[in-house]
Amino acid sequence: MSDRNRPTLAAVARQASVALSTASKVLNGRPGVSAATRQRVEQLLRESGYARRSLDPEPGGLVELVVEDVLSEWSIEIIRGVERITRESGYVLALASLGDQHAPHDEWITGVLQRKPVAVILQFSDLTAEHRQQLRTRNIPFVVVDPAGDPPADVPAVGATNWAGGVTATRHLIGLGHRRIGVISGPTDLMCSRARVAGYQSALAEAGLPYVVELAGSGAFSQADGEREARRMLALRDRPTAIVAGNDLQALGVYDAAAALGLEIPADLSVVGFDDVRPALWARPPLTTVKQPLQEMAEEATRMALRLRSGDIDNARLELATSLVVRQSTAAPAS
C-alpha cells in the first residue's frame, strides 16, 4: 500500500467515533483510554492496515531485549550477543526483565509502544496474539530467542538443536560404557526441555537400552532442583552411574548431591550439563556439557529483527547447531 493510499490516523479515529487525541493515545500506548475504547481502536488499526511508515530508523534508536533474569548466566550470554550487534549497527540496547514469567504482561506492551524501539528481541518468551498484532501495527519487528513453546508459523524465532544435543550427550555416556543413565529435564512445559529428553530417549533406544521411569526427573532450571532430583536417583538401590542434566545449573546441583553422599565425579558418577555457560568451566571438576551457542543465537536474532524492519529476509526461522564439550566430569563407569 502506498503512503498516498494508507489510512490516516484521523480516518481511524472517525471510524471508531473517538477524538484524534484518543486514537493517538492508543497508537502510542499512553494511558487515559478505557479498555473498551482501546480494544475498538486497536481492532480498527489492524483491519484498516494502518502502520507507521517504514522509514530507516535514526542511529541511536532503541533495540529492546526482554529477558527473564538479567543476572542469570543464560541471560548474560544473550545480552552480550544482542549488545554486540546493536552497538555495531549504531543502536542503543534497552533491557526489560520478566522475572519468572514466560510472557510479557500488558504493562510491558504499554511501555514498549511508548518507547517505540527499532526492534524487540525476546528471550524464552511467548507473545499473545494481541501483543504480536500491536507490535506489527506499529511496524516494530520482533524475534524470539529459544522460544518456550512451538510458536505460530508467523513468529520469527532463533533456536538451537536441542534434540540433537540430548542425543549427543547420551551417546557420549553410552560410548564410555554407561548403561544406567539418569536424566533431569527442565520445566516440562518448555519445548527445549521436552526436545532434550526426547534426544536422550532416542539415544537409549538406538543402543538397545530401556527408558527407566525412576531414572527420569524434572524441575526448574536451577541448582536446587538438580540437587533434589539427583539425591532421589542416587538413593535408589540400583543407582545411575551417569546423569544428563537439563542445563548447567542443574548439573551443578548434581555435583552437590554427589558430594553430600560421598560420591566422586567422575569416578563414581559421570555428569553432563547443557548450555556451556561460564560456571561449567569453573566447576570442579570442569563440566562436560552440550554447548548451546547462546551469543550467536542472540546475534542472529538481532540481525533478523533489523532485516525484518526493511523486509529484507527470506527465512524467519533458524536453528543453530549444538556441540558436545568434553571436560573432566565424565569417564567410564567403575567396575
Image (spheres, rainbow, N blue to C red):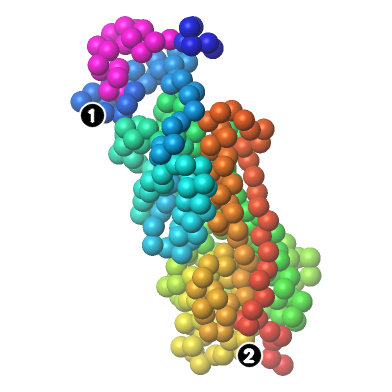
Residue drawn where x is 71% and y is 85% of the image: 332
Q: Nearer the viewer, residue 167 or 77?
A: 77
Using the image, tell me which numbered label, if any, was put on residue 333. Answer: none
Q: In terms of sequence position, does the residue under pointer 1 or pointer 2 come before the other? A: 1
Quarter residue 105 falls in: top left
Left or right: 30, with 320 as reference point:
left
Task: Give the residues drawn in magenta, as a range.
Answer: 7-26
In the rendered view, tell whether residue 151 sits above or below residue 14.
Answer: below
Quarter residue 22 falls in: top left
Q: Looking at the image, can residue 44 be seen?
A: yes
Q: Position of residue 258 (x, y in %)?
A: 51, 85
Residue drawn where x is 24% and y is 11% of the image: 19
Residue under label 2: 267
Left or right: 237, with 261 as reference point:
right
Residue drawn where x is 65% and y is 49% of the image: 319
Residue 193 lies in the magenta-colored region: no
Left or right: 204, with 127 as reference point:
right
Using the image, tell me which numbered label, if any, was put on residue 31. Answer: 1
Residue type at tag 2:
Ala
